[in-house]
Image (cartoon, coloured by chain):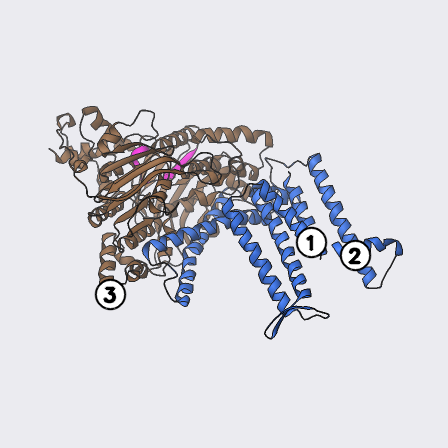
Amino acid sequence: MDPRTRLGLLSCVGMLAICLDAPISLALLAGCCVLPLVWLRVSAVWWRRGLVAVLTVVWSTVISQGLFYAEQPRVSLLQLGPLHLYREGVMHGLAQSLRFIALSLAGIGLTVSTPPDRLYAALLALRVPFGLALMASTALRFLPELGEQMQVVRRARRHRGRPAWQRAPWRWLALEVTLLRPVVARAWRRAQRLAESLDARGFDPVAPRAVRRPLHMRARDWAVLWAAGVLASGVVTARLLYLLYTSETWYWPALRPLYGFTRNWL
Amino acid sequence: MSVLRLRDAGYRYPSADSPSVAGVSLDVEAGELVLLTGPTGCGKSTLLRLVAGLLQRHGQGEVLGSVSVLGTAPGSWAPHERVQRLGFVSQEPDDQLVAGTVGDEVAFGLESAGWARERMAPRIAEMLEGVGLEVALDRDTRALSGGQTQRLVVAAAGAAGGPVLLLDEPLAQLDPRGAERLLAGLRTLADGGVAVVMVEHRLEPCLPCCDRLVVMESGAVVADLPPSELRPGSAGLATLRRLGLSVPGLLDLEDRLAGRDHDALQPLARTEAHRRFGPEIIGVDDVEWAWPKAAEPALRGVSLAVSAGERVALVGANGAGKSTLLAALAGHLDRRLGRRPEALVAVPQDPDLALFQDRVSTELAYGPEEAGLSADDVQTRVTAAAHALSVTELMDRAPQALSRGQRLRVAVAAALACAPEVLLLDEPTSGQDHDQVAHMMEALREQLAEGALIFATHDLALALREATRVVVVERGRVSADGPPDDVLRALPPDSPLFLPPLARLCVSRGWPLLSAAALAGGQ
């Protein structure tokens, strides 16, 4: 799939995540965003980590929104001493967390499935300035390596000292901060070398460049983009019409089934 | 006219009181391959950056004298002119990658220079063949081994056909065969009219290919001679020895024999390799390991047991699995794999990532303090480790701000301060000159007399000199394991590892594989 198609799909997911409000449809959207990761055969370890992260986000958002929901009307589901867990807050928290998860999954799917150089080419083709496109693709390439470097630093520290948890929490925290030092120093050194390499190889953020591998949109790309665009536009239109109705700006009786569908499902 | 012309050239860094490089006058003609060498920190890399125009454009220090490349000042070139006039490769090839695939990496300079698309494909193929890199163009650059990445950045730097190519330690991560192929590629480029200037510590493989040897000391050029003038008893050779630089083995032997014929040599037998060692101290059994997204497993059923008192060199081609085997021994792959003592320290290939304190003294004290030693004992350990690795004068400096060779020495000193039973080192010679490596290995021999040292290296001369046992790793398997003499003597002719000339002489004469000093000392 052309990387521009993927960027287009990401934009559609963004539009849907903003316009959808019903937890069920947001859950469906998040489910669709998982599909690229299934296709990419992400390792079991990452699935486990991802699941923990998703559950943490959903749980913490639902609980915090459920406890501190201030709008009226609200229905108490549970009383915990002086605190109430409100149904409306729970639903709101669920929608917010699913929105975040859908967007995050779409972003992760894009970055994991698209080599940075292809993303860079797509950004250039979409007329993003050369310097900005190169910066974005380079950052995407280096960010995962920062995690790996942290792991190397932790191992190096572990060989020379006690386990991190065998000390007071504030000392642990201070140690964690010191572990960033080599990674930052390494990143700085790397940025310098990369800048030199770019400089020596004629990098010019504003000059036109030749392109070795131009991108090609195939019929399949257009079909996918068209389908996603129609779906996103349809949802946006339905949401706008519903908004006009609820704000008593414009009402058309023939659209009553659409209003009902939007309220219940979107 | 000289392609490259320096007159009293120099550079003073903004934070320095005196210039790091000063008074350098040098001319390089088209088609010349110049080998620039000198002790660590003598200003070689600074000089290379000055010639590339990088310091003029980005440095905030003072440029001294004049530097001209192709008759103009390199600092004044427009970006598209730079790439067509000069290629530059710095140390740390991984840090210089700008594209996601091999093809795009080589094409980057061509795109900057505005080459037509149909001309790019043959040029990319030509450059990759020239450096001996046989991988698919769509291969992810992050999936390449260190040696492959090194060759890729050289190909990428020279792709746009600039008549000047500058390289900073291009052989640092290459196995002997890879180094040989790259040097042949550079010779071909030079024969085609490119002026090549290469900074390198490993003189032995470079000298046969180069036209001139330029030696630097404390920011100045102290010798400039053709390699043919490096003869026994010559002033050039004396300079190399005085500066602690590596002297090619055969030349070293002839110089030490001072006119005597080496046919008459009756070298001493090597005895240390056959000494008895203590009980097993670390080991792994039948390890299988594949890195995610790798085309082939990194380790295939590898077993290795190392005893106390052994110094084991893991040798093999780039990507053979040496570093993965070290990781398995250290328990980094899976702690349940194998047996290892508590007191084990592994220094990563990139020493930066082992240095997390704000001063060298606290870096060295971290391990002993964590072990709960008294302040006096901590100080004793720190002093001993600093002395052993020659970092005493660096104690108040930030480890991250040191040169690569110094950072490696501090990382090893910090490891030694922990008094490990087993020390694992990945490429301990990187960025260090001959004397520093020799000094470091001497310290390790003493400190780990009762423990074990396991190090991965491409440097067979180092393995021969320092190891009591050599393990050859080949495509994820151990293909040979035993005393260095036996293992290296039996290397097949098509092995990516091949013996240095002196060792080849020893094999041909049926002598033990000894250093020039040991051979000459046997008389």
Percent coordinates x, y for residue B392 in the rendering: 26, 57
Measure the C-alpha gap from mark 2 to mark 1.
20 Å
Tag of residue B374: 3
Q: Chain A hue?
A: blue
Quadrant containing the N terminus of chain B is top left
Measure the C-alpha gap from mark 3 to mark 2.
73 Å
Determine if the magenta segment contains residue A121. Answer: no
Q: Is residue B73 visible?
A: no
Near-viewer residue (B501 or B44): B501
Which quadrant of the figure has residue A168? bottom left
Question: What secondary structure is found at the residue carrying circle 2?
Answer: helix
Tell me the chain of label 3.
Answer: B
The kind of residue on which mark 3 rests is Ser
The kind of residue on which mark 2 rests is Leu
Q: Which residues are magenta?
A: B193-205
Tag of residue A24: 1
Tell me the chain of label 1.
Answer: A
Q: Is residue B178 visible?
A: yes
Quadrant containing the C terminus of chain B is top left
Q: Are marks 3 and 2 on the same chain?
A: no
Left or right placement of residue A264 versus residue B40 in this view = right
Residue extending farthest to the right is A253
Task: Please say if the residues under marks 1 and 3 sit with CB atoms less than 8 Å apart.
Answer: no
Percent coordinates x, y for residue B64 in the rendering: 40, 51
Tag of residue A240: 2
